[in-house]
Image (tube, rainbow, N blue to C red):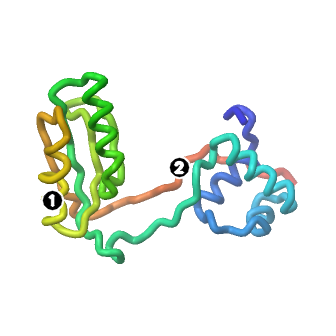
Amino acid sequence: MPAHTLDDTDWNILDRLQGDARMSNVKLAQGVHLSPSPCLMRVRELEAGGYISRYVTLLNPLKVGLTVSVFIQVTLEKQVEKQLDGFESAIQKRPEVMECYLMTGDADYLLRVVVPDIQALERFIVDHLTKIPGIANIRSSFALKQVKYQTALPLPMPAPRRK
């Protein structure tokens, strides 16, 4: 389903599911003014078209003992395909790395890492990160407070429904 074929109902479905992926199809259908069968068909088409990539449960990191959130800038010795691929492959295997971005600017990569304590961060950096070939520099910044955290994407607002 190409992006240009999405109508207001599709956008509304995506927006509502971002807010509550456990919403029943009946409740979703009511919210978007469809009957359940056509609503479910649209959700399946959005899944098949890749608009919905997966459904997840978001946990509270503090409640599960992950109290340290760190942003790590990594600079490689060279930005060559082999080093980029090697770094990315190694990072994919690390569960404490929540996000990893190839960047422009001073650092080549920006990581968001979540660990239970400073000792776990030290083990991650010393035992894993520094062992990845081709790393020239590592800079860490601790998050003191999470001011905003959002998983829902800012979607175009559907046009108001006409009565």
Q: Which one is earlier in the sequence, the residue at label 1 or at label 2?
A: 1
Where is mark 1, residue-wise? 123
Residue under the point 19% across and 50% down:
128
Farthest residue to the top: give it.
80
- Other-residue count near label 1 (Cα within 10 Å), few / some / many at <14 / 14–19 / ≥20: few
Q: Is residue 131 above or below residue 26?
A: above
Quarter of the image containing the C terminus? bottom right
Quarter of the image containing the N terminus? top right
In the picture provided, is 103 more to the left or to the right than 3? left
Q: Which x, y percent locates residue 104?
A: 28, 29
Residue under the point 59% across and 48% down:
53
Q: Which x, y percent locates residue 14?
A: 65, 52
In the picture provided, is 10 more to the left or to the right than 155? right
Where is mark 2, residue-wise? 153
User: Of the residues shown, which amino acid type is indicated by label 1?
Assistant: Arg
In the picture provided, is 87 more to the left or to the right than 24? left
Helix or strand or loop: what does disc 1 sit on? helix
Q: Is residue 76 above or below residue 96?
A: above
Of tags 1 and 2, the one toward the viewer is 1
Helix or strand or loop: what does disc 2 sit on? loop
Residue under the point 81% across and 52% down:
41
Instruction: Give the quarter of the image for residue 145.
Output: bottom left
User: Of the residues shown, which amino acid type is indicated by label 2?
Assistant: Leu
Residue under the point 32% across and 31% down:
85
Q: Which x, y percent locates residue 43?
A: 73, 52
